[in-house]
Image: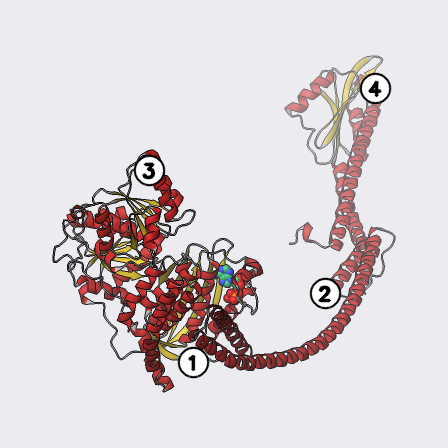
Amino acid sequence: MKTFGKLNVAEKLRWMILLTSGIALLVASLISLSIDYFSYRKLLLERAVVLSDLIATNSTAALTFDDRKTAGKLLQSLRSEPSVNSATLYLPDGDRFASYVRGTREQHPTDRDDRQWLDSMRQADSLRYRYDEDDIDVVRPVVMQGEQLGFIHIDTSLDALYERIVDYLAVTLLLWLLIMGGVYLLSNRLQRRISAPIQHLVEGIRKVSDQQDFSLRLQGGGEDEIGTIISNFNTMLGQIQERDDKLASYRKGLELKVEERTRHLREAMEVAEQAREDAEAASRAKSEFLATMSHEIRTPMNGVIGMTELLLDSNLDVRAHRLADTAHRSAESLLGVINDILDISKIEANKLQLNPEDFDLRALLEDTLEMIAGQAHRKGLEVVPNLPPDLPMMVRGDPVRIRQILVNLLGNAIKFTERGEVRLWVRPGECDGRRQTLAFEVSDTGPGIPVEQQERIFDAFSQADSSTTRRHNGTGLGLAIARSLVEKMDGRIELESSPGKGAHFRFTIQVGLVHQDTEIPKPAAALQGVRILIVDDHAVNREIVQNQMVAHGLRSTSASCGSEALELLRQADTAGDPYRIALLDWHMPEMDGLELAQAIQSDDQLKTPQLVILSSTGADIDEAMAAALGISCFLQKPVRQRQLFECLGNVLGQRPRDPLPVAQNHTGLAGKRILLAEDNPVNQEVAVGMLTVLGCEVDLAADGVEAVATWSENRYDLVLMDCHMPEMDGFGATEELRRLEREQGRPMTPVIALTADVQKGIEQQCAVAGMNGYLSKPFNMNQLLATLQQHLQIVDPGSGSPDRRQRMLPLLRLEAPLDPDTLQQLRDLDQASGRNVMGRAIQHFIEQMPVELEALKQALAEQDAETLRGVAHRMKSSSASLGAQALSRHCARLENTARNGDLAPVAGLLDGIEAALPAVL
Ligand code: ADP
């Protein structure tokens, strides 16, 4: 059955009407029934009272005369009164005098209750009555002249009353049913008047919501609330429809606009497409033009460069030589720019082709590093390469283009970095057995590149900061070319940098794997298990070298400074497992590599390992110095892996090198205090090293003024005075010393001039200044020893010993006079070109070099800096072309010195060239 809440409005209304009417009728009937009940019962009582009065009045005679018969007849007259059950006449003492009982009814019951009640009534002097369940009892005294003769009791039945009520109920029920039927019919009509509009409203709402048709309008509805709802609903529909109409028209407008715009856009795109095609055609034409032009320009440029080189080689006077040299350098740099433009135009014209070939990856990387190392070292930058041992050896790719990318990135890193380091890290990436990904990272500690400029520096002709770039030159093409090349090699290039934090360029390329027939060289057996100590203050370098050592089977430990290294060496000795090799970085703070070498040598308790020195500044130590420090091998960074392990293999084959027998105790120089006045840091380093080995105590002064000041405050056994120094030169400083000595009455300190000047008259010049002698640079340990002993008047305890020179082991020559790789390249060139390039080059070199050497000497004699620089430059490039690296470095140093206009060290450098040349020839 439905609960009331779930009924619809019509049913609810119907039920409400029926219930209300039913309850109202019921209540009305009950009230009417009760009224009728009480009034009828009262009527019966009144009649009984009247009858009792009548009987009492008429029975006085019968009572007076004790006539029971008359009294009986009198009571029998009540038979006509159907409601009277019984009537009894009593004597005052309560005896029954006469009675009447209706029909077959027994004598009026005289139960205890009746009896008691009648006894109480005997005394009553007036009418008494009581209602019972079924009847009404009326008692009245019969009195005559104030004397009570008896009393009458009439018992009236209530049956008539109950019959009347039953009839009444029956009629009421019938009426109730009739009325409720009528009410039901009426309610049906009435509820329809209210529920029908609601139903109509509901239907309308449902229709609107189902059909979304807001044009519908609901009919009907009077003045009442439902009418108001319907009219409001219609109004709301009207508003929605109006809004929808507006929206529709707005949409239509928009569609029209979009259509129009699309048409415009299409037209614009067509125009743009046409313009793009035109631009591409123009760009292609431009690129082709550029490519052709660049090519056309390169051909005469080669002529210009070749001819200026020839011109430079001919006998030019100083001015003409300088002009030709400037023209030559300008042409070289112009050629660089043209090459870049040619590359970029080839890239733009989609004509850049890679030339794949099989090549040795490690050799390529090491060559590249060597190429840029000089440039880095000149700026005092450390080059930190990490070429892990698991790099593939032979790969297939375009080595020329790979080198171009690296040279560009490394070149930029060096160009923009003023201090710190430049790193090249290479890692093998994914490999599918045929193709290998190589990941490169070139990073620096330079100024970095602002984030907002990072995107565009890979675009052609764009530079991060035009002011810096102007300072550094450049076309802004390098990175654009690098990116295109990387992409051509199926890789990506990206940059991570923030100002002040350096630039990190990362790129990947894909190369082919070449499966070699030849066996991959195994790490040298001799090195297996050998204990090596790596000493370097640069943590990354230490880790890289250590990894290399481990990969080659050595047992390596590393130390970050000299004192730690000494401690480790001692511990290893105590443990009975001494280090056999110590790889020392030259340039370390506190104790440098040379000082550490000395400290190791001079510690009697230590079992001296083979000492290998690595230098990153391009500075060299000469044979005598190496011998004096007991250094077995000296290598320039970046070291080629092969070269390093060859060196380690070689030194293992020897006994640890003893330092020169000119040790402190034997020289007679032990404890002598020497003041060294020298401005050149490399020379300082070398001289201090030598003097320390000889047992002297050394103080340094960087110029003449400092020398005089230091000398004044201390007592020295001898002063080594460089002639050419800033502030005050050696001659001036010596004159000052002598003056002070005279003034203060100090004993004369021997002063030895250090000079690279070998020109006539220098001896005299020294003497005039008050110097006691001179030592021409570069000097070796023995020359220094002899000079010191001479001027300190010490008799050399070791002199005359026949094996002394023999005991000076020659410095292990790791660097061959001619680099085999370069020679191989020349041979390859011969083969490729079919021309005797190498033979002709060698011939030219053999003829040219002695002539050039003479020219240098001549220029030195004439103090002609420009000629010195030009000749040294030619000798540098000629020797580099043939792989005479050491000779080339000597020449480069002379060239730089001459360019700076300081001719003092030239004589020493010339000696170096003269010494290196015969081996090359
Ligand atoms: P450019 O010939 O001018 O060096 P590049 O394309 O090689 O041309 O470099 C574009 C610009 O990117 C440079 O001019 C310089 O502003 C910036 N740049 C490149 N490498 C570095 C770097 N390592 N550190 C700081 N700036 C750099």
Badge 4 or badge 1: first in the primary sequence: 4
Within 8 Å: ligand 1 and the Cβ of disc 2? no
Within 8 Å: ligand 1 and the Cβ of disc 1? no
Give the residue at the far left of this rendering.
802
The image quadrant of residue 524 is: bottom left
Q: Nearer the viewer, residue 608 or 168?
A: 608
Give the class, few, some or many, for how many residues have Cα within 10 Å of label 1's Cα (few <14, many ≥20).
Answer: few
Q: Amino acid at mark 3?
A: Glu
What residue did someone put label 1 on? 355
Give the residue at the far right of this rendering.
223
- CA–CA distance in space, label 3 to label 4: 196 Å
- CA–CA distance in space, label 3 to label 2: 122 Å
- CA–CA distance in space, label 4 to label 1: 170 Å
Marks 3 and 4: which is nearer the front?
3
What residue did someone put label 2 on? 210
Q: Establish if 51 lies above or below 10.
A: above
Q: Amino acid at mark 4?
A: Ala
Q: Position of residue 370 (x, y in %)?
A: 36, 66
Asked if marks 4 and 1 touch (Cβ < 8 Å), the reply is no
- CA–CA distance in space, label 1 to label 3: 74 Å
Badge 3 or badge 4: first in the primary sequence: 4
Q: Nearer the viewer, residue 306 or 220?
A: 306
Marks 1 and 2: which is nearer the front?
1
Q: Amino acid at mark 2?
A: Asp
What residue did someone put label 4 on? 61
SS at mark 3? helix
For the point 30% across and 57% down, the residue is 778
The image quadrant of residue 105 is: top right
Q: Establish if 768 lies above or below 551.
A: above
Give the residue at the far top of this rendering.
146
Q: Nearer the viewer, residue 306 or 321?
A: 321
